[in-house]
């Protein structure tokens, strides 16, 4: 499917599997935290990459062997459920996760700026939304006050005011 | 209860104002190019969001959370736009801009809110981007005045001039404003989030115990200033008095500590039920001790990060709040000064003229509780008039109070007669500050889509009933607050006399609560008994007051003191005597 | 049947452009005048109208129905809320001249 990755529209083959789905022998799949934790090493041996979906009521510390994961999908089950923003920052800033962080679920244009600041670098938009238009969301603001995953310094440490 | 963390590090005093003589003070925070850019870019972004809604690209369900991050509500008759007034402080240019907006885009009036903001009741969706552009011209905006995010930080309306203040809290309010503005992690919290800051050790005038986070500037044993942190207070359908979660935090850790609280709340606050989603529920369900432990654990990760405030940043912001060029004047005692000559003027001096830390100056409250005025409503011409008065008498500034009034903070005692004469002409000299008719009142069912009953007509009826100024002043301090529904925007829980509008089979009805208090000895009012209709609740308030006047131990015993001494019994018996 | 003494249902919403109350009329359009609204007696008619209203996402926001009593050709809402919504604020709009 088409996703935004590093601020470009790209096609990629990651498949988001339902929590209880059987894991296919090949292909790039995103599986539940529980499925991953059951045997992180074994997943590494299949033909195709394995990523994990972190649901909004799960916490980063529940994921085992983080550094073996090329991708973590942070789920936003509803637009208004903001736990994923904290989870993304924790993954980047506390767990030093350097793989791909993908927003999935109800992901809309007007959340992208905040998500990017929290360390999310790829975005699977809600189906039906204009992905080209969404690209412009990253330009909504050129200045931010806070420290976040994209810059550990708040504005008062970044510039002389 | 307090989570102690050893002795605070030794530090020099928190900050010193530059001396008055060589400072050109602007009296409030002035935007620099960065602040201005953020506000302008926000206006542009919202213009895009509005145009996508008008073109049909976004649905109302998708637009709702976006407009709610920008203070735009859908009310009973129209959209309502809430404009942020950080800690209530405005200059005359901003006041005139509000007058202009009221005239040009609304129906000639705005409304002072209990979060020290201003809201307009009738803008069209298409006009909102234009209003935001106009606001940006005077360093104003509507950012985060609604929605499940960090709302406008409020403070003591007398901050900076109050004689009982340890330190001016407004620089810290501004620091919190900047930190919370478009905070990327905390834009979609479980529920709205309100922070209040006070600089007074006692006589809390910012109701910090009823906020999601209350911050109080305190002095430690070593004489250094820092912050005492309260959390988990709130009104709404479950009123809760906040818990002190930390006795002292050094000033440089303010933001990291707030960020730790917000992160614990964002991750663990309930999202399954909007009525249980405020932080007060989380604090109670976890227990204050465990909540505090979770915050402290999170804070250990954040405390030494770049969030640590620098002295340079605090001084950069504090310099804008430096006091104006006060004249050196003799202290003047107003008591008895004008008594006997003009009773109305004497009452106004006694009630609406408040102490000031600088000799020869006073803070003056303009109550927007004139007899036929919906509490807190301000017309376009009144906005302009207050701007003129601020320029003439108060260094060009005024403050919105959470009691829906305006304060001229820095009036020379020698100017009081001239100011008073002008206020009388403008119908803004009612001497009822903190008296029974200084009513806090939500818009109620006249405007609000959530309300169950009207609130404004009850306030106007009470104004009529208590229009004898001798009687009103004899009653003395007594807070009356009216909410049109259980969401408690009118703060009825913390009123000495609270009125709650309810829906009884589609019809409006009113419950009476007694004994609430919003300051140091905070208490939540208790429902007296069965609900009344509109006329009935006004009669009940009158009866309650008669009981108080007959029962008070002396003229010095306030209504609240009397109620606390006697309990509800005599009031209840009198109010329901005919039943 | 409508509840608590109501005889009919009316579909209402807020106009996207102004936020003003609006009512679904018999001709399928929207009217600001409650008395021109389509008042329907059965739940099936009500649900059909509401479904139609929900499709007009650009024009109106959050359509819903409420109970009314129709007597002598006059539509009378059962709730104080809908009466005030139809008539405007009951307090004087303050604009000193």
Image: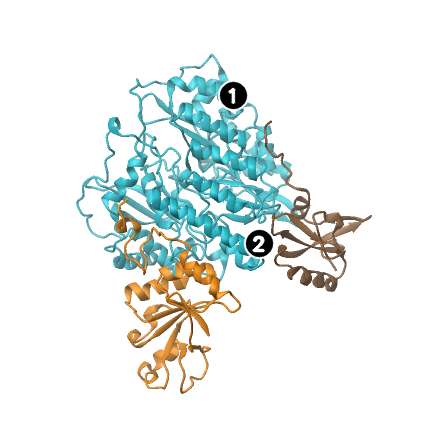
Q: Is residue B217 visible?
A: yes
Q: Residue furthest right?
A: C72
**Observer-nearest of B334 and C40:** C40
Return the x and y of residue A37 as percentages of the image width and height.
34, 78
Q: Write down the residue under mark 2.
A: B54
- According to the rendering, which colour does chain A have? orange
Q: Which chain is cyan?
A: B
Q: Position of residue A109 (x, y in %)?
A: 47, 61
Of B98 and B520, nearer the camera is B98
Q: Which residue is mark 1?
A: B424
Q: Quadrant of residue B338?
A: top left
Mark 2 or mark 1, whichever is nearer to me: 2
Asked where in the image residue B482 lies, by quadrant, the reply is: top right
Quarter of the picture holding the C terminus of chain B: top right
**Quadrant in the picture for residue B543:** top right
Dot 1: element: helix
Where does the image place residue B364, in percent across and percent down from the top left? 42, 26
Q: Secondary structure at mark 2?
A: helix
Q: Earlier in the sequence, mark 2 or mark 1?
A: 2
From what the image shows, is residue C11 above or below residue B498?
Answer: below
- Identify the colour of chain C in the image: brown
* Distance in Å between CA atoms under marks 2 and 1: 46 Å
The foreground one among B422 and B519 is B422
Q: Is residue B241 visible?
A: no
Residue A31, position as x, y percentages in the image: 40, 78
Q: B284 left or right of B245?
A: right
């Amino acid at each position: 499917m088409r996703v935004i990755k590093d601020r470009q529209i790209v096609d990629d083959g990651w498949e988001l599997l339902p929590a209880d789905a059987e894991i296919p022998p090949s292909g790039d799949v995103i599986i539940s935290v529980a499925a991953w934790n059951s045997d992180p090493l074994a997943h590494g041996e299949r033909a195709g990459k394995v990523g994990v979906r972190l649901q909004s009521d799960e916490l980063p510390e529940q994921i085992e062997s983080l550094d073996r994961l090329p991708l973590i999908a942070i789920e936003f089950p509803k637009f208004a459920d903001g736990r994923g923003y904290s989870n993304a920052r924790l993954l980047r800033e506390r767990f030093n996760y350097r793989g791909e962080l993908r927003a999935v679920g109800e992901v809309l244009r007007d959340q992208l700026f905040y998500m990017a600041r929290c360390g999310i670098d790829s975005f699977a938009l809600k189906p039906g939304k204009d992905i080209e238009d969404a690209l412009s969301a990253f330009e909504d603001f050129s200045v931010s006050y806070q420290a976040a995953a994209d810059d550990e310094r708040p504005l008062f440490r970044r510039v002389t005011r | 209860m307090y989570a102690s963390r050893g002795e605070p590090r030794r530090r020099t005093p928190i900050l010193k104002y530059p001396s008055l003589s060589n400072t050109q003070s602007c009296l409030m925070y002035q935007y620099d190019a960065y602040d201005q850019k953020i506000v302008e870019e926000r206006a542009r972004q919202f213009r895009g969001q509005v145009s996508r809604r008008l073109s049909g690209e976004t649905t109302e369900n998708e637009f709702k959370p976006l407009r709610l991050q920008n203070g735009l509500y859908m009310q009973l008759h129209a959209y309502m736009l809430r404009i942020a007034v950080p800690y209530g402080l405005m200059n005359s240019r901003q006041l005139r801009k509000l007058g202009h907006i009221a005239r040009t885009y609304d129906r000639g009036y705005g409304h002072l809110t209990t979060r020290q903001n201003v809201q307009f009741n009738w803008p069209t969706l298409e006009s909102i981007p234009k209003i935001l552009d106009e606001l940006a011209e005077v360093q104003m905006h509507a950012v985060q005045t609604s929605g499940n995010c960090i709302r406008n930080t409020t403070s003591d309306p007398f901050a900076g001039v109050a004689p009982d203040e340890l330190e001016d809290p407004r620089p810290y309010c501004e620091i919190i404003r900047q930190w919370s503005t478009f905070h990327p992690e905390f834009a979609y919290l479980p529920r709205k989030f309100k922070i209040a800051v006070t600089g007074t050790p006692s006589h809390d005038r910012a109701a910090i115990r009823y906020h999601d986070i209350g911050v109080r500037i305190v002095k430690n044993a070593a004489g250094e200033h820092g912050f005492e942190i309260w959390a988990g207070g709130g009104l709404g359908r479950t009123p809760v008095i906040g818990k002190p979660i930390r006795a002292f935090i050094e000033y440089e850790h303010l933001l990291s500590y707030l960020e730790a609280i917000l992160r614990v709340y964002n991750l663990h606050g309930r999202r399954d039920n909007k009525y249980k989603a405020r932080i007060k529920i989380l604090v109670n369900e976890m227990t204050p001790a465990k909540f505090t432990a979770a915050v402290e654990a999170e804070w250990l990760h954040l405390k030494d990060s770049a969030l640590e405030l620098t002295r340079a940043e605090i001084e950069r912001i504090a310099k804008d709040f430096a006091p104006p060029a006060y004249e050196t004047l003799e202290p003047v005692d107003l008591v008895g000064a004008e008594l006997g000559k003009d009773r109305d003027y004497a009452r106004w001096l006694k009630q609406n003229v408040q102490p000031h830390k600088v000799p020869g100056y006073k803070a003056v409250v303009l109550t927007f509780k004139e007899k036929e005025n919906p509490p807190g409503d301000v017309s376009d011409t009144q906005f302009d008039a207050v701007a003129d008065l601020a320029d003439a008498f108060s260094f060009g500034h005024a403050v919105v109070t959470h009691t829906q009034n305006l304060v001229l903070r820095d009036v020379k005692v020698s100017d009081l007669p001239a100011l008073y004469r002008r206020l009388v002409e403008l119908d803004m000299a009612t001497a009822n500050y903190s008296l029974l008719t200084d009513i806090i009142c939500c818009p109620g069912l006249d405007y609000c889509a959530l309300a169950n009953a009207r609130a404004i007509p009850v306030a106007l009826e009470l104004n009529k009933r208590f229009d004898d100024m001798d009687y009103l002043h004899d009653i003395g301090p007594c807070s009356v607050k009216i909410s049109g529904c259980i969401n408690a925007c009118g703060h009825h829980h913390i009123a000495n006399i609270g009125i709650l509008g309810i829906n009884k089979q589609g019809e409006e009805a009113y419950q009476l609560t007694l004994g609430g208090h919003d300051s140091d000895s905070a208490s939540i009012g208790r429902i007296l008994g069965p609900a009344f209709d509109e006329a009935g609740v006004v009669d009940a308030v009158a009866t309650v007051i008669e009981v108080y006047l007959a029962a008070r131990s002396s003229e010095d015993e306030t209504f609240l003191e009397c109620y606390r001494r006697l309990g509800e019994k005599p009031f209840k018996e009198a109010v329901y005597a005919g039943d | 049947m409508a509840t608590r003494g109501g005889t009919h249902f009316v579909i209402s919403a807020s106009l996207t452009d102004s936020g003003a109350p609006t009512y679904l009329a018999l001709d399928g359009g929207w009217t600001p005048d409650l008395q021109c609204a389509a008042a329907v007696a059965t739940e099936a008619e009500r649900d059909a109208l509401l479904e139609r209203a929900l499709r007009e996402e650009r024009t109106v926001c959050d359509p819903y129905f409420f109970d009314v009593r129709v007597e002598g050709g006059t539509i009378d809402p059962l709730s104080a809320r809908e009466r005030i919504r139809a008539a405007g604020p009951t307090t004087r709009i303050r604009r000193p001249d």
